[in-house]
Amino acid sequence: MIAYETQWDYLFKILLIGDSGVGKTNLLTRFCQNTFDQDSKSTIGVEFSTKIIDVGQYIIKAQLWDTAGQERYNAVTKSYFRGAVGAFIVYDITSFVSFQNVTKWLNLVREFSNPNTQIFLIGNKSDLNHLRQVTQQDAKKFASQNDIFFQETSALDGSNVEKSFLILSEKILQNL
Ligand code: GDP
């Protein structure tokens, strides 16, 4: 459930990271504004949006950070990770390469963020099942081997987007 109160109990910095074009910006706008932009073009520079999340016992102010194109030049710096309590590593289910690169992003998150940072693997563009290059089975296996959560989403039709943000927020709360 999403609440719109301005009072909140915790501020969570949550990152979105992954190859360019996997849908990070659209996941963010789907969650924060419930919109999708077919022709979205990455802008350069880190950007964040906020959203109030009601997880029942607490009201969370989620500050969601998007690399906004810097990932294309491997220019994501250590400061992006500072203070992050959660991270979504996103790949595109229609791009095997973007899934292969998850290892690189995971290493980066583990290197630069707090050991307690909760990591969630997202296979986005689940609406493009006919173009799938990454099986759910392979992604689940990777996630369990690396002890991270996994969910497929579609920023286009909204599937599992809100759910993933809620699950991550709950996991962060449990590990505070
Ligand atoms: P970013 O570079 O990771 O931030 O990716 P964007 O959010 O800019 O999305 C890249 C492209 O993929 C855009 O053309 C989006 O419209 C498209 N896209 C993003 N998410 C989805 C999705 O869930 N389904 C489909 N079919 N296209 C998507």
Image (tube, rainbow, N blue to C red):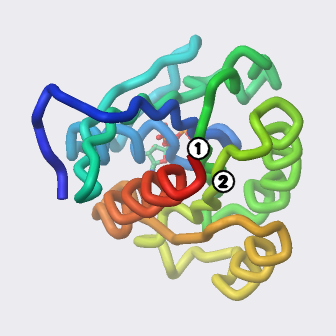
Label 2 crowd (10 A; few <14 / some 14-19 / many >=20): many
Quadrant the N terminus occupies? bottom left
Q: Please, is residue 105 above or below residue 62 in the view?
A: below
Amino acid type of disc 1?
Gly
Which numbered disc covers residue 119?
2
> In terms of depth relative to the viewer, which is nearer, 98 or 50?
50
Q: In this view, does 30 lie to the left or right of 148?
A: left
Secondary structure of the residue carrying tag 2 is strand
Q: Which residue is drawn at 59% across and 38% down?
A: 85
CA gap between label 2 and label 1 equals 6 Å
Front-most of residues 138 and 119: 119
Question: How many neighbours does mark 1 have within 10 angstroms: few (below 14), some (14-19), or many (20 or more)?
Answer: many
The x, y position of residue 107, in whole percent, is: 88, 45
Residue 90 in the image: above or below residue 84: below
Tell me which corner region of the image, top left, top right, bottom left or bottom right, holds residue 147: bottom right
Q: In the displayed structure, does residue 54 sit left or right of residue 166?
A: left
Mark 1 CB near ligand 1 (8 Å cut): no
Q: Residue at x 53, y 51 (%)?
A: 172
Q: In the image, what residue occupies the spot 64% across and 40% down?
A: 17
Do labels 2 and 1 touch, CB within 8 Å? yes
**Residue 141 locus on image (x, y percent):** 78, 82
- In-front residue for pair 94/34: 34
Q: Name the residue under label 1.
A: 86
Determine whether the residue tagged by mark 1 lies in a helix, strand or loop: strand
Q: Where is residue 36 in the image (x, y as percent from the top left)?
A: 28, 45
The reply, left or right, for residue 117 in relation to residue 6 is right
Instruction: Name above or below for residue 121 compared with residue 88.
Output: below
Q: What residue type is labelled 2?
A: Ile
Q: Where is residue 166 in the image (x, y as percent from the top left)?
A: 37, 58
